Amino acid sequence: MFEARLVQSAILKKVLDAIKDLLTEATFECSDSGIQVQAMDNAHVSLVSLNLRSDGFDKYRCDRNLSMGMSIACMSKILRCAGSEDTVTLRAVDNPENITFIFESPNKEKLAEYEMKLINMDQEHLGIPETSYSCVVKMPSQEFSRICRDLSQFGESITFACSKEGIKFSASGDYGQATVKLAQTADADNEEEAVVVNMQEPVKLTFSCRYLNCFIKAGPLCAQVQLSMSNDVPLVCEYKIGDIGHIRYYLAPKIDDDEEN
Amino acid sequence: MGILGLAKLIADISPGAIREQELKHYFGRKVAIDASMCLYQFLIAVRSEGAQLTSVDGETTSHLMGTFYRTIRLVEQGIKPVYVFDGKPPDLKGGELAKRAERRDEAQKLLQAAEEAGNAEDVEKFNRRLVKVTKTHAEEAKQLLQLMGIPFIDAPCEAEAQCAALVKAGKVYATATEDMDALTFGCNVLLRRLTFSEARKMPIQEFHFDKVLEGLELNHNEFIDLCIMLGCDYTNSIKGVGPKRAIELIKTHRSLEKIIENLDTKKFPVPEDWNYKQARLLFQEPEITDPETIDLKWTEPDEEGLIKYLCGDKQFNEERVRNGAKKLHKARNTSTQGRLDTFFKVLSSPNPLKRKVEDSKTTNKKNKKGTTGKPRGRPPK
């Protein structure tokens, strides 16, 4: 038996909004410690790693480890049926064929149940090594979303250049160029609005706008986003999900080919 | 052509070995293209009002048109194509080639008849059957590729074998061909429909050889024997043995030798002097150039050269050719998107795979006892 209850269904709604553009389907691994999802997009350029700890749920029970393949589009549709004040409960039996979503209104007068078929999936699982990154930048997630949206009008990719002073985002295309520089916040009174750069070595990396614009869908989950970068390795873009867990996006950088020149 | 009914057999028995992907997901991949196969496609498909495209003197240009535009389409998606041309056909292919010539003669006759009868539909049909890729076509295509800055390789013998060797050596990601025998040669990844027209909107089919073997529960040598039974270009097959029976036989007996020993030859006459051993050897040790000695280089396109070559006698539209050259140039100078699997190692997915291995073991045991393999699926829960 697996059961997980969240008083705020809004959190789960936002999580789904944050992954539904990248993934069509994903395996949810449920264990005693919580729910985990690791999945790549079809092109294997980006990876979503979602972690919801069991202690973050209002009620959590998982007798046997389960891995449940779910259609993200379908799950997103179901969650749209939940009111934002509703309590949501996920429930499945051991060896499940289906998963049930139960939505309860705050005054307990309305109870809705949605059952979704699980899918069989053969997914590749990636081993992600623990690395220390050359630059770790924390900034307001709204600011990051804005920069990605603005710069993607100029080109297909954005270059992130990080140094002691701060971080510079730039894009260029047929119309011209665009650059946005963010300096490190001098006195961080308000933690949520601060830009903090933690740098060992300067880095410069280029990433595709298409994927960045999917990542920023997680903005509503958290006021701050953390970007971890090292030269020539994938970017990690992390949003905390309240007290319950986090969502991490990995994105492979663009590479200049000079081997053939 | 290729192996008779192999694609269907794989789709039936081992659907997990086939994946469909959109073209745009192949960015950054190097792909070896079976040139003869795709020139043939172009000669058949690139037509206007049913007739091949020609220059002023009536020389065919369909193959150049196809090579030029479809290569650009691949390059624009960030794919790095390398074309592999056939060398001399292996001796064993003589029979197959004679058969093809015969069919062509027949088509010629039918064409004449149709022309006399004035049946336009039939004329077109038989016209297409007469299509043959000649030396000149190949030479012209090579000249064009050179100007486009796309590498090509002359295989000493069969192009599919050379492609497979390139894949095995890790020089390219996959072989693009419609012929399934690239798998028989041991090519790990085979792409079909890569050079199809965009208008057909067909996703690319990706065959993974290791998964094919896993799904069919065969090793490479057994797979080769299976292909010979299905019908390949190099030798005859046993009459009356279709795909279904062929897979049953190979699973029970595990080699052609044993199959012949145990087969009821009255019901299924084995061809006289059946040279399946040579055919098998041809698949196991084909004549190829050592892939390590091959250096693949993609270079800048020669715009003026292209104009001179295509817009002179061949009468291509200059503006379009210039546009094409620009696209080639631009694609060369944009950085390619990296892939996560090059940074992080793929750990095999935990549970389902383990179950599969156990499953195949048990069915193997059953096979030894003489029963036949049942279609695989997930083990019952």
Image (cartoon, rainbow, N blue to C red):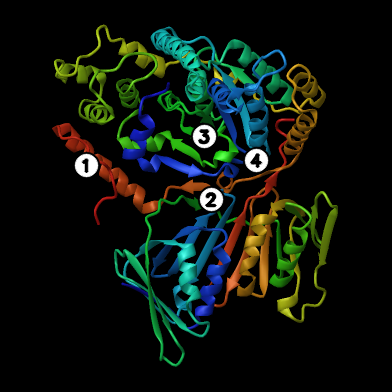
Label 3, residues with CA under 10 Å away: few <14, some 14-19, many ≥20: some
Label 1, residues with CA under 10 Å away: few <14, some 14-19, many ≥20: few
Q: Residue at x 75, y 74 (%)?
A: A194
Q: In the figure, residue B7 lies in which quadrant?
A: top left
Q: In the figure, residue B248 lies in which quadrant?
A: top left
Residue holding disc 1: B362
- What is the CA distance from the residue labelled 3 to the residue labelled 4? 15 Å
Disc assigned to residue B77: 4
Residue B18, percent across and down? 42, 40
- What is the CA distance from the residue labelled 4 to the residue labelled 1? 44 Å
Q: Are marks 4 and 2 in contact (CB under 8 Å)?
A: no
- What is the CA distance from the residue labelled 3 to the residue labelled 2? 19 Å
Residue B137, percent across and down? 62, 15
Chain of the residue under label 2: A
Chain of the residue under label 3: B
Element class at badge 2 = loop
Total numbered labels: 4
Residue type at mark 3 is: Arg
Residue type at mark 1 is: Thr
Disc assigned to residue A42: 2
Element class at badge 3 = loop
Residue type at mark 2 is: Asn
Disc assigned to residue B193: 3
Frontmost of labels 1 and 2 is 2
Residue type at mark 4 is: Gln
- What is the CA distance from the residue labelled 4 to the residue labelled 2? 16 Å
Q: Residue at x 47, y 58 (%)?
A: A25
Chain of the residue under label 1: B
Task: Check the picture and name the quadrant holding the C terminus of chain B.
Answer: bottom left
Q: Can residue A244 be seen? A: no
Position of residue B22 in the picture relative to residue B283 (left or right): right
